[in-house]
Amino acid sequence: MNQDNINSFLNKYIELTDNISEKYNYPSNIKHVLYLIIPAFIIKYGISEERKILSCFLDVPIYISGVENKRFTAYFNRKLHSREENGNKQYYSTKEIVINNYASSSLLELIDNLVHEFNHAINSIINEVKWNDNEVCLRTGLSYICFYKDNIDKVKYKSKDIILEEIINTKQTESIIDIINSFNNYSIDNSDFNNTLYALKHDIEQGGYKSSAYYLQSYICKELVKNKTFIPTIENLRFKGNVEDIENWFDNITGIEGSYKKLIKLLNEIVEMEKDIPKFKLFKKIKINNIIAKGREVMDIINIFDKNCIYK
């Protein structure tokens, strides 16, 4: 991007956003936020992935609920379906991004939540649904929810890597919001784009955006997500849906069989223990110390991975 081409680049996606907003009858404030978000996704993933990115925004509507949820401003919602094709049963999903009542949310919170949830959706496009004789599995980035094949409304099990998925997704959310903020370096012609960007500018610190989502887990894994072997490989495998390869790849680098599973297990345990802390008036310090101990175990695994990487 440079000053000579920035406006023609943005205008293309502003026009597309107008069409999407008209299709789904989005209010103007959602439309103006998408003015910023959609081109930032194109920059993040590259023009070679433009078709997939745009299809996600075209095919995944934003539904605004009347529910107020102080914990979640938005979430990625899907429903699994089946149909007969040439005598064979095929499985597919319908999707939406649900925004809860966001009147009390800041512009930055709204953008963070929308970017976060659309990033889950974009990283679930390829190889989204797989099935065998017993189950149907629906992929969200690194993680799966698997359903009984004879009753696709009933969950059979969930994979354990949802916390690592959220850490990676949070890191990418920060990167995309930094791209949005970088538009301030240019002179933009569109006044609606400018006004939304200006309102956002003063909410982002000079050193770059830091999300508050999964803060403890992201802090514990900060060296892992900075690793120049880990992040590009995980992002590529996750986007292309080749997540079955990750465990062997990770263990081969650490040289310790089961190190990836142990990392996932510890991250889940930390989340569960963190949830329990408010319940305990007594022994709270013991619970915190247990979290710290498990955090150190996670860091030990990460240090081994980092040490064995040639490019880090």
Image (spheres, rainbow, N blue to C red):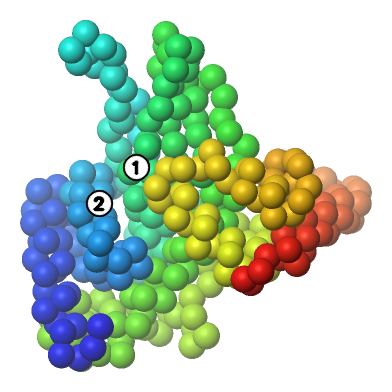
Q: Amino acid at mark 1?
A: Ile
Residue plotted at (39% across, 54% down):
119
As measured in the structure, the alpha-carbon distance from the residue carrying label 2 to the one carrying label 1 is 9 Å
User: Does residue 83 appear to the left or right of 246 in the view shown?
Assistant: left
Decide if residue 102 is in sight here: no
Query: x, y percentage for residue 174?
Result: 47, 69
Task: Please tell me which residue is depicted at 35% across the width and 67% down the height of the picture.
Answer: 44
- Percent position of residue 271, x then y: 69, 47
Q: Residue 226, located in which quarter of the rendered image?
A: bottom right
Up/down of 242 relative to 148, above or below: below
Q: Amino acid at mark 2?
A: Lys
Residue 213 appears left or right of 181: right
Task: Compare residues 241 and 200 and report the one nearer the observer.
Answer: 241
Mark 2 surroundings within 10 Å by alpha-carbon count, few (fewer than 14), some (14 through 19), many (20 or more): some
Q: If the image is split into quadrants, where does the C terminus sit? A: bottom right
Front-lying residue, 55 or 276: 55
Q: Are marks 2 and 1 in contact (CB under 8 Å)?
A: yes
Query: In the rendered image, which residue does mark 1 sit on?
Result: 126
Q: Which mark is residue 52?
A: 2
Image quarter of residue 258: top right
Residue 301 at x, y percent in the picture: 77, 56
118 shown above or below 34: above
Categorize mark 1 by other alpha carbons within 10 Å: few (<14), some (14-19), many (20+).
some
Element at badge 1? Answer: loop
Is residue 145 among the parts visible in the rendering? yes
Say which residue appears at 49% left-offset and 25% top-offset: 146
Local SS, label 2: helix
Q: Splitting the image into 4 quarters, where does residue 224 fall?
A: bottom right
Residue occupying image coordinates x 13% and y 54% = 20
> Where residue 130 appears, x then y in whole percent?
40, 27
Mark 2 or 1 closer to N-term? 2
